[in-house]
Amino acid sequence: MAETTYIGAINGALAAELRRDATVRILGEDVAEGGPFGATKDLAAEFGDRVRDTPISESTVMGIATGMALAGLRPVVEIMFIDFITLAFDQLVNQAAKARYMSGGQLRCPLVVRTSSGAGTRSGAQHSQSLEALLVHVPGLAVAMPATAADAAGLLMSAVRADDPVVVIENKELYFRKEPSFDPAPVPLGSALVRRPGRDVTLVATSRTVHEALAAAEDLARDGIEVEVIDPRTLQPLDLGTILSSVRRTHRCVVAHEAVRRGGFGAELASLVQEEAFDALDAPVVRLGAPATPVPVSPPLEDAYLVRAPQIVSAIRSLLNGSA
Amino acid sequence: MWLIRAFEESVSELVGTGEVVGLVHVSIGQEASAVGVCDVLEARDRVYSGHRAHGHVLARGADPAAVMAELMGKAAGLCGGKGGSMHLVDVAHGVLEATGVVGGTIPLALGTALALRETEPGAVAVVFFGDGAVQTGYFHESLNIAALWKLPVLLVCENNGYAEFTPRSAHTPVERVTRHAETYGVDARTVDGNDVVAIREAASALVAPLRSGGGPALLECLTYRMRGHYEGDPAKYREASEVAEWKAKDPVRRFASGAVATGELSAEDAAACEAAARRAVAAAVSAARSAPFPAASALTEDVGG
Ligand SMILES: Cc1ncc(C[n+]2csc(CCOP(=O)(O)OP(=O)(O)O)c2C)c(N)n1
């Protein structure tokens, strides 16, 4: 069976979008050389200077891409590691995210930011963060977190076609994960996917943690515990409906992500679930995430930092035993 | 220089065996700037670096075993194993920070220079960065402020012609980094970055005024990294002829053979120097290897906030 990787799917989606729409552009460091992970491999050969290398000037490049978008192009900017999106925050948060609103709807900003996130590669505190909660907090930005190759391609295609800024947060540990090949198709923003049905507990997980959640569900199934695993795929817009209807059946909800628990997306989701489905809950929503520390390099410390399947399993067992 | 060379050759091997972890950038071929600049510094001076920092820290006198242990994520590492290759800090030797954010330590060096001027007049701050960092806003904004406030800071650009896989010409139309200094009236020199003696002379000339109220200064070292951008990078983006040309200018061998040729060093002493460095590195590796990983409790220590 033919296989594809997450990074290969991104590469294919970028090529397809460049071919489909002459207004699409790619900007970023080393993108003409294929980029450090290969997301833009061979694109410069086919698309010439529509794929443009930039200096290490994230802030200004984000501003340039925003200006291109305001003038009708569809730029896809690569921020190599999400850790460096902080450098570009001014242009992204104060310009791109607000252009449509501040102009009373005169402007649209069809900007896509692709970036890599996540720990587990011993890359240290400035190359491993999960900063999605900072982005979700900013009105005007859509935030996608694909967990599979098909979604990495499909959400990216939708992001390119969207008329407002979308940040697509990819995961480094997933880049070289193989999946059976598929026909890439746009995945709508704001549509969650039930990755595994179950009646006992709703487990919402994002990005790489989806795979930990599925492994945990598999493990628990051996004891007859049926976990419903939901992947929101985009945190903004959020498909709360799919999550709530699950919680109304299972009466229990766990949310797991790689980011720091404090102030994380799980906090937002737990609030939403208790606001909208308080009566359906048999127990408080459980949040799993990283401790509030920077990401350490040392292997045993980084391993302890990350939420992996066993931690999800024990959290669900405690929840079901009423000791959560 | 042999210590840095031997250390990084060993690091490169240990990345291969998985004992050194993470994203690792070695400076093989660029050792002269670390050694030439640090040689004119004093214990009271403070140094900052970037992602390619092993040489700078060693040139300041850090214990090779502690640096190696850090690269392995061991508790005995400079930073207890939590920082890793890109974040080497050794306060005891005046190395305040190394960053994985390109250009990120340039403003820190300005701030430290400002503080030193008040608290330890005569001391200087030095920051090492690559030519890629010159395109960051930090570099340009810092050059302006450092000149405006006459800060005792030496900016050392190790211009190796590439930022990751992209040649300098694709990043900027400005060939010489020192050109930027002209705009602000900053004292600047471009030197052969593979000539440790020339670097030492230039650094000495640039640092002297900083100690007596002058500043800032910029030193551009023209050099080349002999290996890929990071360990594991096959570096397909450069011509073999280019690599061969620079190999002939190897700063370590060049200094050694030069000193032997002028009679400053005997051939035996030159060989002994290399052998001693290799022995020191072997000892550092075995110490780091047998050192334990940090205790689980270290994860949540030293967070603050
Ligand atoms: C702000 C930021 N953007 C991008 C990167 C990714 N990156 C790491 S090293 C590097 C190139 C740096 O080139 P240079 O400053 O010349 O240093 P060299 O690697 O040549 O020593 C890039 C783009 C980064 N670390 N930080």
Image: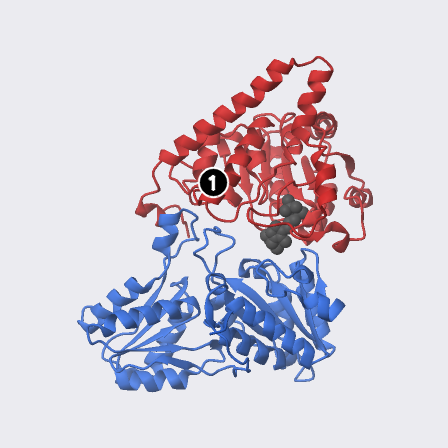
Chain colours: A blue, B red
Q: Residue at point 59% right, 60% down? A: A80
Secondary element at image label 1: helix
Q: Residue at label 1?
A: B14
Q: Is residue A100 above or below residue A50?
A: below
Q: Is residue B83 above or below residue A71?
A: above
Can residue A126 be seen here? yes
Q: Nearer the viewer, residue B153 or A9?
A: A9
Q: Quadrant of residue A321?
A: bottom left
Q: Is residue A192 above or below residue A266?
A: below
Q: Nearer the viewer, residue B102 or A225?
A: A225
Q: Residue at point 49% right, 61% down? A: A172
Tell me the quarter of the image containing the N terminus of chain B: top right
Q: Residue at point 57% right, 71% down? A: A10
Can residue B217 be seen here? no
Image position, residue A76 (x, y; %): 64, 71
Q: Residue at point 78% right, 39% down? A: B186
All told, the count of numbered labels is: 1
Image position, residue A222 (x, y; %): 22, 72
What amino acid is found at the position of numbered circle 1 in the picture?
Leu
Image position, residue B136 (x, y; %): 68, 53
Q: Nearer the viewer, residue B290 or B214?
A: B290
Q: Chain of mark 1?
A: B
Image position, residue A63 (x, y; %): 69, 66
